[in-house]
Amino acid sequence: MDFDLSPEHEAFRKVVRDFAESEIAPHAAQWDEDHTFPLETVKAMGDLGLFGLVFPAEWGGGDGDFASLCIAIEEIGRVDQSMGITLSAGVGLGANPIFRFGTEDQKQRWLPDLVAGRALGAFGLTEPDAGSDAGATRTRARRVGDNWVIDGTKVFITNSGTPITSIITVTARTDDGISTFVVEAGTPGLTIETPYRKLGWHASDTHGVILDNCSVPDHHILGASGSGFRNFLSILDDGRIAISALALGCARACLGSAIAYAKERNAFGGPIGRNQGIAFALADLEVAVENAANLTYKAAWLKDQGRPFTHAAAIAKLYSTEAAVTATRVATQVFGGSGFIEANPIARFYRDAKILEIGEGTSEIQRIVIARGLGLPVS
Ligand SMILES: Cc1cc2nc3c(=O)[nH]c(=O)nc-3n(C[C@H](O)[C@H](O)[C@H](O)COP(=O)(O)OP(=O)(O)OC[C@H]3O[C@@H](n4cnc5c(N)ncnc54)[C@H](O)[C@@H]3O)c2cc1C
């Protein structure tokens, strides 16, 4: 067995960490406060090759493995969860469906810009009445001549309204089940609603999307007609490892700053970290971070080995995201009152963490996936 990442992985981690600390960390609080989507920084992430890491060189990608993408998301997420999810969703929900299920023509049309980070793609699955139960999709697509005409409403769609959003891949009910369609930004009948005011992820772009008599050409269907349900489940498997990496970045940031503060903050004549009440909480967090890292990179490794990873991805996502929420709560407690003040990044992490337990499958859905993996007939 070998638990070490390779020297190349570690060198890559340093490159991303340097970028995150110099180009993202100094601005994250302001973007959060202003609810700004920092377009130039996202493009700089593209210039660094982060959106293309896992795609083949023939599409402009880095020919890298999934572990590298996890490293990038973890390191970006360690300073700014909003930029971490922008990267995770841009790769996993934007480019990946085109790469996995697109025809040669579809790839040529959309993939190079997505891989380069010159464009962002979004994935519209969730609807007002179909979230965890995505099979209850109500959006419909019907054939009219050589086109598909789509009607429906999608909610909470990440990266759907940025200035560089090129496509939104949406699921819709067809006569043979659920199918997936690529809708280009600016298509008549596609309306991107005003951005949500969210508890966290303020610098991440999230909108509701309305499709009203929205007509796309026949060749915009992605994958075989009726295969949309199966296809999006496998897209979400990849995404769950990525969200686990994002949660790991959050938990690591909280642990690191709480340890530093526990050493320097004095109360009752000494550092607060000499109290077992503080030290043990941080020891428990260290255990959680270690577990989250092992589960995340094991799931990535299984995927990179071409082995089944649905079960491992659900375990990693469930554990890491719940660890991240705990980490933000514990770190805030260690900081006392100053942890509740927005000038402290811990306050931002506290608000950002909760969605990790909800997006790309809630904790309850992960438990269902894991229980089914145990052969239990849970519904
Ligand atoms: C900021 C943000 C970004 C997002 N980005 C995207 C995106 O890019 N694309 C996209 O398609 N969606 C996106 N989502 C949607 C997200 O994936 C859904 O919110 C999530 O899957 C949960 O669906 P829901 O909100 O409809 O909750 P529901 O499915 O209504 O669930 C409500 C509660 O019931 C629980 N529950 C449901 N079924 C069961 C069950 N069988 N057993 C036990 N408990 C159950 C859930 O776990 C949850 O606690 C985003 C959401 C947010 C907030």
Image (cartoon, rainbow, N blue to C red):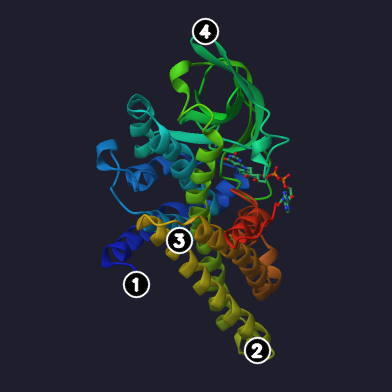
Q: Earlier in the sequence, mark 1 or mark 3?
A: 1
Name the residue beneath numbered marker 3.
299
The quadrant in which residue 2 appears is: bottom left
Foreground label between 1 and 4: 4
Label 2 sits on what residue type? Gln
Tags 1 and 3 touching, CB below 8 Å: no
Q: Earlier in the sequence, mark 4 or mark 3?
A: 4
Label 3 sits on what residue type? Ala
Label 1 vs label 4: CA separation? 56 Å
Q: Is mark 3 within 8 Å of ligand 1?
A: no
Label 2 vs label 3: CA separation? 34 Å
Foreground label between 2 and 1: 1
Name the residue beneath numbered marker 2.
276
The location of residue 159, given as percent across then percent down, is 53, 37
Tags 4 and 3 touching, CB below 8 Å: no
- Most distant residue in the bottom direction: 269
Q: Is 144 drawn above or below residue 346 in the view shown?
A: above
Label 1 sits on what residue type? Asp
Label 4 sits on what residue type? Gly
Label 1 vs label 3: CA separation? 15 Å
Name the residue beneath numbered marker 4.
145
The location of residue 132, given as percent across then percent down, is 67, 45
Residue 136's tag is none
Q: Earlier in the sequence, mark 4 or mark 2?
A: 4
Q: Residues within 10 Å of mark 4 (few under 14, many from 20)?
A: few
Classify the position of the N terminus by image quarter.
Answer: bottom left
Name the residue beneath numbered marker 1.
4
